[in-house]
Image: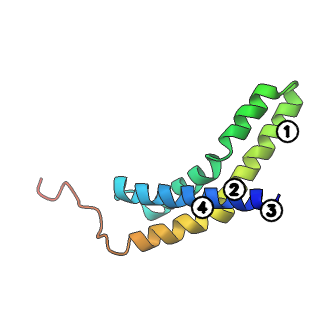
Amino acid sequence: MVFGVLFLAVIVALFALAFSFILNIVRPATSFKRRVLMAALGAGFIPAIPAFVVVGAEVYSQAEGLVAISAIFVIALFLAAVIGFPVSYFLTRRLGRGIADAPDHDVFN
């Protein structure tokens, strides 16, 4: 069980690294906070998608499904906040050191 939790933590951290790197290249004009938040939430929710699908397919009553889906949602938010946010924050801050502000395209208009 410990290895499963560690594996999940590593997967979330790797997704956070990947999303932060990609957002830094693709969306440099987006604010720092928004890039960090998008990377952290994406890293938290991507590993939870199979659980959402399985619970949605196997639920027998409305109350059971609501409790199970909300529990998975809370776990995904927890993973995003505890693991995804620090990783994406530090990587985005480090990658943003050498980048100047986004160019203003209306300068010469």
90 shown above or below 12: below
Residue that mark 2 sits on: 8
Residue 2 is tagged as: 3
Q: Amino acid at mark 2?
A: Leu
Q: Is residue 32 left or right of residue 75?
A: left
Q: Amino acid at mark 1?
A: Val
Q: Quadrant of residue 14?
A: bottom right
- Mark 1 or 4, which is nearer the eye? 4
Toward the viewer: 42 or 31? 42
Residue that mark 4 sits on: 13
Circle 4 sits in a helix, a strand or a loop, which is it?
Answer: helix
Residue drawn at 31 percent across, 70 percent down: 99
Q: CA distance from mark 4 to mark 3?
A: 17 Å
Q: Are marks 2 and 1 in contact (CB under 8 Å)?
A: no
Residue drawn at 83 percent across, 57 percent down: 1
Residue drawn at 62 percent across, 56 percent down: 11
Q: CA distance from mark 1 to mark 3?
A: 25 Å
- Mark 4 or 3, which is nearer the eye? 3
70 shown above or below 30: above
N-terminal label among 1 and 3: 3
Circle 3 sits in a helix, a strand or a loop, which is it?
Answer: helix
Q: Position of residue 53 (x, y in %)?
A: 70, 33
N-terminal label among 1 and 4: 4
Residue that mark 1 sits on: 67
